[in-house]
Image (tube, grey):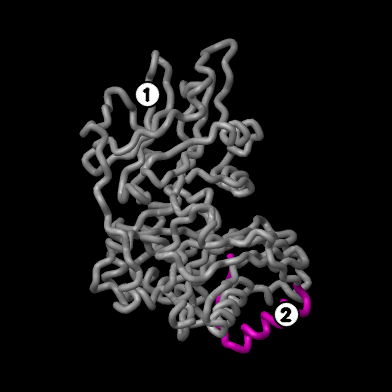
Amino acid sequence: MIRIHCKKIAFIILVLMIMASCGKVSKDVSSIHVENNKGNDVRDNQPSYELMQEKYSENGIIIKYPQITKLKDNAKQKTLNQILKAEAVKELHEYVDSGTEVHVEIDYEIKRQSERFLSVQYTGVRYVKDAAYPNHIFYTTNLDMKQTSRLGLSDLVKIEKPFIDLIKSGEFSAVEPEQKDLLGNFTQDDLILALASADVPEGSPVEAGIESFSYLTSDSLGISIPVAHAVGDHAEYEIRLAQIPDNIKQNKELWTELSPVVDQPATVVNEQKLDTDQYEVEESQSFQTTLEGFGKVRFVSTYGYPEGLRKFFFFLLDDQGHILYPFPDFYGNREWVARYGGVEAVAFKDVNKDGLKDVIIIADVDNGVHGPGRVDEFPMAEIYFQKKNKTFTTLPALDQALNDQEHNQTVKDVIQYVSEQRIIVN
């Protein structure tokens, strides 16, 4: 992972000089406009500026990052763009003239774009020659557009016991379900130390070397903390802004412009509860999560037995077990069954970057035959894309390509393949 240190103005200038002298910065031909941003709902109140993508590319290092354009205040735009640029390549000096063969690819996602706030999330991979394994890179940049400055977690919340208690209470949902229990490995002091240094606000102890970050979405606050490489290098957790008590908020003036979306109870389908006689729940692949439009829900993986054949079925439930939403038929159910297989992975991720979390499922399927003619279980992946009308849809052609070309082994395989496609469902 990237190691973060407090930077002085002189270092920012140095980084920009390095880029000018030995790197290549180019504008991507596909600008990202607020009126044409793949339907991204992270925009608030149609901000008066636009974003365009630029790219640093040199000696095996590729870093994509946003730049602001069409802001009326040219001086402010220049300063903000310098911050964005320097933040995106903040660790470039570790690779320049180091003599180490390294390959770095970093892309970004706009998590929130409004008149007051711009939140950018960077993810990528770093390969170092002869290293045992690649490292997953994660960092963020949050801007206060009004004050022309960086924004850190400690600018929004008080990093004290009440905030840590809120994290420990389970109000924060894991972005990756398999990481939901990792917070239990941290003591209160661990979390205070990690989060007090999040986003490297001015005055943080350099020697702490803790790589924690925060970000904003249209309705949530996210945090990222470092974890062991075996479980992902970093873990992300989110909480709805409406769930953060006033006594934890740090800057009331900032919060007046965050405009949190208040949780609304989702519509129950005919007041029906999940029939556990008809559906067998796979508890290990069922999770509490938060989804735009639905709020806090329980995602449930189940097995049903149509015509005596064991197949997969997925639901969203409320806290009383009522069905909020039954997902469309799983792609693997069409020709296969789950006699020997099972649900292997579930992930909630905004795959097509439209501001709405999608659901990725990988399940092992087989032909249901016992004895001669049996086909051993093999993976089948499905992506349920969330739509603005509180439904999920699938793309059969994408599902077929995803599985025929075997980009279905892991959640990361699925995301990598789909990230190369242009997916618009809203």
Q: Is residue 40 above or below residue 257?
A: above
Q: Is residue 78 above or below residue 165?
A: below
The answer to whether residue 423 is seen in the rendering is yes
Q: Residues within 10 Å of mark 1 (few under 14, many from 20)?
A: some
Q: Residues within 10 Å of mark 2 (few under 14, many from 20)?
A: some
Q: Magenta stretch: residue 53 in it?
A: no
Between 238 and 130, the one nearer to me in the picture: 238
The answer to whether residue 167 is seen in the rendering is no
- Return the mark for residue 18: 2
Q: Magenta segment range?
A: 1-23
Give the quarter of the figure containing the N terminus. Answer: bottom right
Q: Magenta stretch: residue 8 in it?
A: yes
Q: Give the tally of numbered discs.
A: 2
Which residue is painted at 23% across and 32% down in the image?
270
Q: Residue 260 at what x, y percent from top left?
A: 32, 63
Q: Name which residue type carries label 2.
A: Ile
Q: Quadrant of residue 192?
A: bottom left
- Return the mark for residue 304: 1
Q: Is residue 274 above or below residue 250?
A: above
Q: Name which residue type carries label 1.
A: Gly
